[in-house]
């Protein structure tokens, strides 16, 4: 019985450690990888009429999602770049750039590895 109590206590500690409210940093670390890739590869306006090149890059940001869920959000601030959706998805007169989707594809392995490493570190602290 003594070993069972210790095992149950360890399981409780693991459950607490991986609770969504305790893993927000893991989610944000992964989202930061995507944001960095997006900003490194997003197009910058080169035409004379674009007085604010780089607004598409500047409009991207990350934020924590709902408090009770393990998530982070990649968002675009349309006050910074009102045409961000047109750049990404295109419209009847502009071809899509698919920059966000390309950034996601480019870093998906890195994001997965970051999450795996962070959870491994977290669990090793709890179980040691």
Image (cartoon, rainbow, N blue to C red):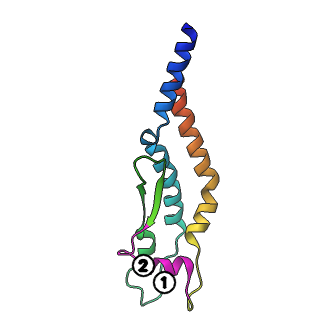
Q: Position of residue 21 (x, y in %)?
A: 42, 41
Q: Position of residue 83 (x, y in %)?
A: 44, 81
Q: CA distance from mark 1 to mark 2?
A: 7 Å
Residue at point 41%, 75% (across, down): 55
Q: Looking at the image, which residue sits at the far top?
A: 2
* Element under disc 1: loop
**Quadrant of the image for the N terminus?**
top right
| Circle 1/circle 2 CB separation < 8 Å | yes
Q: Position of residue 7 (x, y in %)?
A: 56, 17
Residue at point 44%, 45% (across, down): 24
Query: To which residue does mark 2 refer?
Result: 53
Q: Position of residue 101 (x, y in %)?
A: 59, 67
Rendered position, 7 above or below 97 = above
Of the image marks 1 and 2, the number of the one nearer the N terminus: 1
Q: Which residues are magenta?
A: 76-91
Query: To which residue does mark 1 refer?
Result: 46
Taking depth in this image into account, of 125 and 41 the one nearest to the observer is 125
Q: Is residue 79 magenta?
A: yes
Rendered position, 103 above or below 110 = below
Across the whole image, how many numbered discs are drawn on residues? 2
Rendered position, 16 above or below 108 = above
């Amino acid at each position: 019985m003594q070993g069972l109590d210790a095992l149950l206590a360890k399981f409780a500690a693991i459950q607490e450690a991986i609770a969504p409210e305790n893993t927000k940093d893991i989610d944000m670390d992964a989202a930061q990888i995507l944001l960095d890739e997006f900003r490194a590869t997003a197009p910058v306006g080169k035409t004379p009429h674009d007085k604010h090149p780089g607004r598409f890059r500047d409009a991207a940001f990350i934020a924590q999602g709902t408090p009770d869920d393990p998530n982070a959000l990649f968002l675009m601030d349309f006050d910074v770049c009102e045409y961000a959706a047109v750049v990404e998805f295109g419209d009847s007169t502009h071809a899509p750039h698919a920059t966000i989707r390309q950034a996601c594809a480019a870093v998906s392995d890195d994001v997965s590895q970051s999450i795996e490493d962070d959870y491994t570190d977290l669990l090793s602290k709890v179980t040691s």
